[in-house]
């Protein structure tokens, strides 16, 4: 078991790690639209989703994985009416490679984020 930690993504804001590798699989913690410095990204759900992917790419890289090796993504959104906007940004990062995915609307996310995404990926 290996704990994943990078300064290129926001530090955990609670008693958890950015991600963990077990048996060549990387499990990320949910990433919200915080910058690596811990500042919430201003703007709409699309701007926030781009930041979430920036964070995911950083923790995946640190784990020895990438967006191309993601096998499952779970998307949490505050408002299902924004699903199309989130999906548009999501499709920019998963265009040819399309992992399995779940998407759920939630009442509230940490720091009142509009979107949070967690992934499971194969480590190269």
Image (tube, rainbow, N blue to C red):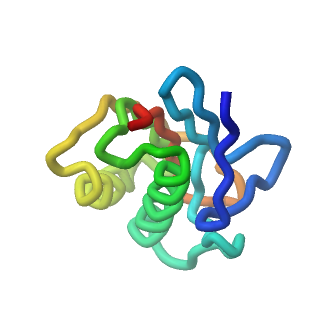
Instruction: Return the residue nearer the eye: 106 or 13.
Output: 13
Residue at x 45% of width, y 57% of height: 57
Numbered label tally: 0
User: Which residue is at a point 65% across and 50% down the rendered structure image?
Assistant: 109
Residue situated in front as seen by the camera: 107 or 24: 24
Q: Residue at x 47, y 45 (%)?
A: 64
Viewer-nearest residue: 102 or 118: 118
Whether residue 103 appears in this view of the structure is no
Please identify the quarter of the rendering in which residue 122 is found: top left
In the picture, the quarter occupied by the N terminus is top right
Q: Is residue 39 above or below residue 124?
A: below
Q: Residue furthest left?
A: 96
Q: Position of residue 104 (x, y in %)?
A: 47, 35
Q: Is residue 9 above or below residue 107?
A: below
Residue 91 position in % (x across, y down): 24, 53
Residue 25 coordinates in the image, percent (x, y) = 49, 28
Instruction: Please state, as top left, top right, bottom left or bottom right, where the C terminus lies in the image.
Output: top left
Give the x, y percent position of residue 8: 59, 67
Residue 74 sits above or below residue 92 on the image? above
User: Is there any visible trace of residue 111 in the rendered image?
Assistant: yes
- Residue placed farthest to the right in the image? 15
| Farthest-out residue, top | 23
Nearest to the observer: residue 11 or residue 34: 11
Residue in the picture at 24% in, 59% down: 92
């Amino acid at each position: 078991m290996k704990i994943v930690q990078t300064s290129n993504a926001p530090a955990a804001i609670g008693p958890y790690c950015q991600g963990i590798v077990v048996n060549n699989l990387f499990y990320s913690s949910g990433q919200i639209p915080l910058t690596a410095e811990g500042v919430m990204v201003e703007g709409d759900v699309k701007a926030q989703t781009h930041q979430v992917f920036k964070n995911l790419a950083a923790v995946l890289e640190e784990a020895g994985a990438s967006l191309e090796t993601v096998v499952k993504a779970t998307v949490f959104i505050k408002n299902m009416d924004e699903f199309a906007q989130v999906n548009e940004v999501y499709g920019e990062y998963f265009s040819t490679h399309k992992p399995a995915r779940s998407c759920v609307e939630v009442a509230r996310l940490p720091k009142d984020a509009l979107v949070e995404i967690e992934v499971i990926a194969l480590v190269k």
